[in-house]
Image (spheres, rainbow, N blue to C red):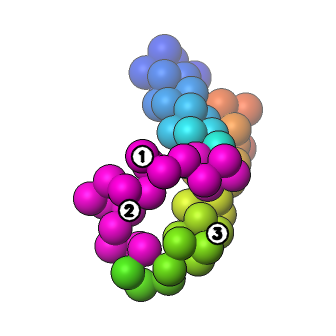
């Protein structure tokens, strides 16, 4: 694995963690952003939190799989 692949894997882990933590702590500034407003309209606040939490975990898992060589 070269440095660029490691960088992308770590970036996925960081972005996934950020999304998961934002949903866990219900950050108001995160859910008032324009991009989150789409999911707020579709799912409501609680549903958007679940959505972003699930997406965060999925992105973290993909990042760890890339980092440890399970995905190329």
Mark 1 burial class by Cα count in 10 Å: few <14, some 14-19, many 20+: few
Q: Which mark is residue 36?
A: 2
Q: Is residue 27 left or right of residue 69?
A: left
Alpha carbons under labels 2 and 3: distance apart:
12 Å
In the displayed structure, 9 sits above or below 57; it is above
Q: Visible in this render: residue 46? A: yes
The residue where tag 3 is placed is 50
Residue furthest left as drawn: 34
The residue where tag 1 is placed is 29
Alpha carbons under labels 2 and 1: distance apart:
10 Å
Q: Looking at the image, is mark 2 or mark 1 earlier in the sequence?
A: 1
On-image quarter of the C terminus: top right
Q: Which residues are magenta?
A: 22-40
Q: Which mark is residue 61?
A: none
Mark 2 burial class by Cα count in 10 Å: few <14, some 14-19, many 20+: some
Residue shown at 66%/47% (left/top)?
A: 25
Disc 2 element = helix
């Amino acid at each position: 694995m070269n440095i660029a692949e490691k960088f992308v894997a770590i970036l996925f882990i960081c972005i996934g963690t950020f999304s998961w933590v934002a949903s866990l702590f219900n950050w108001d500034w995160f859910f008032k952003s324009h991009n989150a407003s789409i999911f707020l309209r579709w799912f409501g606040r609680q549903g958007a939190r679940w959505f972003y939490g699930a997406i965060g975990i999925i992105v973290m898992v993909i990042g760890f799989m890339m980092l440890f060589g399970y995905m190329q």
